[in-house]
Image: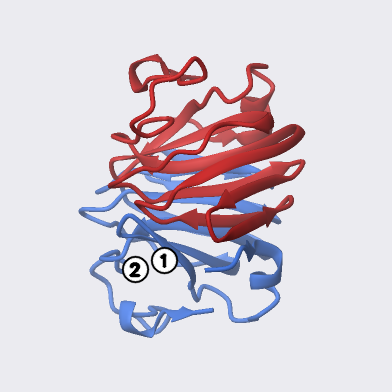
Chain colours: A red, B blue
Amino acid sequence: MSKISISEKFNLFTEEWTPKIIAETNGQLVKIAKGSGELVWHRHENEDELFIVFKGHLTLQLRDGNIELGVGDMYVVPKGVEHCPLAEADTHFMMIEPSSTEHTGKLDLNVTVSIENQEWI
Amino acid sequence: MSKISISEKFNLFTEEWTPKIIAETNGQLVKIAKGSGELVWHRHENEDELFIVFKGHLTLQLRDGNIELGVGDMYVVPKGVEHCPLAEADTHFMMIEPSSTEHTGKLDLNVTVSIENQEWI
């Protein structure tokens, strides 16, 4: 394995709300994604989900309040906690989560990218 | 839990080669550390170790070559792979690793910070 430049990886795609896998560690996948606007309310029953913002601003809407993440901020959404990401235009962020984590939890929507369709870059 | 500002967490300590824990996710700990110079050759038999550099330059010396990490670069040292971190002055980096990960593997040295002495900040 070579070193990974996170910014170079962000330059390899343009799709929004489409996680790209850049590394694996201890059964968890390191993914990066771009987003604008709102994804969808969902929860991961068995997986915590770590977010780190690299560009823009990401609001993690939770049922009991919003978590506001600017560049260099992180947050772990605990397993079972419903959340809905809301991003400023062209926000870039990282997620680290077990390989079993479904993109939009139990929901299979137009915006959903299934595990098998999440691409390594 | 509130959001975590990674840069604010780095402002909370000055010790070098002394991992501080800032979050837990899926049984893994998110740690940050500062380093200058060389730590020690060691390996983690059962744990992959993810590094992301936030300031300075970190060389991960491996037995078959060096991995050079600048700001925004990451690398996963696979379990069982011997490595020795070497940092430019005042380098800041993050590690994500299982909570079972010993600081310097099986070695217990003056520089070793045992799991029970790794502080949450």
Q: Which mark is residue A108?
A: none
Q: Residue B113: name its quadrant.
A: bottom left
* Residue B110 point in image, percent of width and height: 39, 84
| A8 relative to B119 in the view: left or right | right
Q: Which of the two discs, 2 and 1, sits closer to the camera?
A: 2
For the point 40% across and 14% down, the residue is A117
Q: Earlier in the sequence, mark 2 or mark 1?
A: 1
Asked whether disc 2 touches disc 1, contact meaning CB atoms under 8 Å apart, the reply is yes
**A6 or A68: nearer the viewer:** A68
For the point 50% across and 38% down, the residue is A41
Above or below: residue B94 compared with residue B35: above
| B46 relative to B92 in the view: left or right | left
* Residue B60 point in image, percent of width and height: 49, 49
Q: Which mark is residue B104?
A: 2
User: Which residue lies under the disc numbered 1?
Assistant: B40
- In whole angstroms, how far apart are the C-alphas of marks 2 and 1? 7 Å
Looking at the rendered structure, the kind of residue marked 1 is: Val
Q: Secondary structure under badge 2?
A: loop
Quadrant occupied by the N terminus of chain A: top left
**A73 or A25: nearer the viewer:** A73
* Residue A112 point in image, percent of width and height: 46, 21
Q: Secondary structure under badge 1?
A: loop
Residue located farthest toward the front when viewing the structure as drawn? A63
Chain label for disc 2: B
**A64 or B43: nearer the viewer:** A64
Above or below: residue B2 compared with residue A42: below
Instruction: Tell me the crowding category of disc 1: few under 14, some 14 to 19, or many 20 or more residues within 10 angstroms, Cα based.
Output: some
